[in-house]
Image (tube, rainbow, N blue to C red):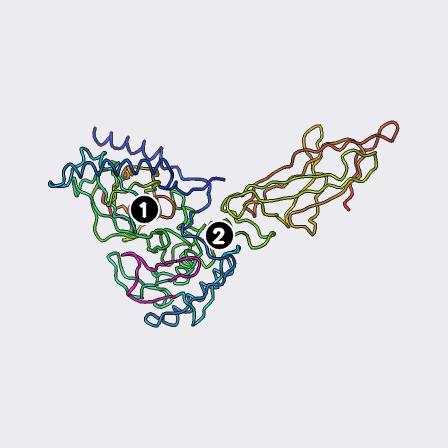
Amino acid sequence: MKRLLAILLAVLVLGTASAPTLAHGPDPILTGGLFAQNKVLQYRWTSSGTPPLDMKLAIHAARDDSNASRKSKSPSFDYDGGASNVVYYGADVPCGTNGLACFRRDTPDWFGLWFRPNGTRFDWGTLRWCELSGAPDGCYDAENIALDEFGHVLVLAHHANFSDASDYRDAVVQTFSRTKPRAAYNAHVFGRCDVAALQQAYDILTYSTLHSTCFDVPTVVTLAVSDSSVSSGSMVTFTATLTSAGDGRLSNNPMSGRTVVLQQRTSTGWTDVLTLAGTSTAGQYRGSLTARATHDYRSLFRGPSNEGAETDGSPAITVFVSSTCTGTCPQSSVSVR
Amino acid sequence: MTHRDAPSIRSPTRLVAALAVLVVAALVVGCDAGGPPATPASPSEALHASIPIDTLAAPPAAGLAGLADPAGASLPGALGSYTWLDEGSDAPWILPSSGGRAHVGAEVSVSFEPAVAATTWVARWAPISADAAGDVASAAEGTGRVLFAAPTAAGSWSLQLEAAFGAGRNAVWYWRIEIP
């Protein structure tokens, strides 16, 4: 009877609490502040803990991985023998009892990284860096772990995994490190949720940089018309603006290089009539058509599958067309200028 | 768009609650200064008494209770990765060399020492095979008191608990649990 009750309790608890979170939110970030946007953070080896050559190469590779995959105005990293920021390899580390590597940061000027040496014995086993140990199964990819540490230095806290951890590949800055040959043990680019957090903290790299698909950033699209009351056959120009409306630095950014369409209201709903072309002004899109009848128009940005951006439509604008034709007027015709 | 970050202990409501706990604790200590440490009236009272997280410079220790063995005792967890303000450490999914035993579906709980309250937590159970943790088989998540059920299948299990203690403080602990 007790066993039955225990099972019922377990089913109840797991049934109500185990449903994995289905959508990402922004990953948590560290609370100590940011480095300056696009700052170059230089590091050097410490004299008392210089890594062996293959470890140096792995850390430099992680530096390049971070610089190439940040997709934001987060700092980049570079090696300089005279730098104040340090990278240490050895046994004398401030890491947690079971830590393979660890970090400290003191914005806006300083950071340090520490890596435990190959062969370190823990209660749970022996640390093997793949780069130093002939890459047997069960080793840790130093380039991946170093990229994780560089991500922490930038501002990233550990990824908020789904309950079942099925989204492990969405981040390199992870709550637990995997060994060869588990999936993503050797990920060498920031995951989409790493990037999303960096973009929110430091801003996107350019106005045409796509927002990471980790979560959808709200957007606002507007529409203005050159003249809302015209005679039939007149050319009307529509100008739309598209901006982000997210949190942090993802607020009020012009969004260039996207697809914004002009829609016309019909008896059955809204229909695309024109794809507006980007102008030289960031986040601005424009197009013209010949108006032959009164219609409602709106601009629409459809959140694309390759970007974390929400769909938004502008309020409708009515273009009143005074008839100059007799009998049945022709339908609107469209031409882009 | 909503942040998944846990609410900060610095929020006014939490600050008042934390101060209230401190005042009560100070009164208790003050009235019993010469005797042994005060014992909470009940386990649930112990779980709800907490100190302000700002007083901790590093993650607390975590203990798992509700086990058949060690019965009536708390089994210390192995600290894995954590971020604590502007420093942190990265560790693997740890399989401790020794562990405890729980009944099928038993209700287990985790408390922290010093006694701080988790704002959010996720407990994940992964079966152990060939002395390694496999994929997560079941999970529970919650806010506040860390209370969840052991797996309903017998076997060797790895338990991971990830807990946040407000913005900027997050840590993970591991246990090895046998379920006969």
Circle 2 residue: A198
Q: In which quarter of the image is residue A271?
A: top right
Circle 2 residues within 10 Å: few <14, some 14–19, many ≥20: many
Q: Is residue A65 left or right of residue B70?
A: right
Badge number at residue B128: none
Between A256 and A169, the one lying in front of the other is A256
Q: Is residue B141 left or right of residue A267?
A: left
How far from the left and from the top, in percent, is residue B155? 25, 44
Circle 1 residue: B54
Which region shows up in magenta? A86-112
Is residue A102 positioned above or below A271 on the image?
Answer: below
Given the image, on which type of amino acid does mark 2 rest?
A: Leu
How far from the left and from the top, in percent, is residue B168? 38, 48
**Could you tell me which chain the residue with mark 2 belongs to?**
A
How far from the left and from the top, in percent, is residue B139? 34, 40
Residue at the image point whose x is 34% and y is 56% from the top: B89
Give the alpha-carbon distance from disc 2 to disc 1, as whole Å. Answer: 26 Å
Given the image, on which type of amino acid does mark 1 rest?
A: Asp
Residues marked 2 and 1, same chain:
no
**Could you tell me which chain the residue with mark 1 belongs to?**
B
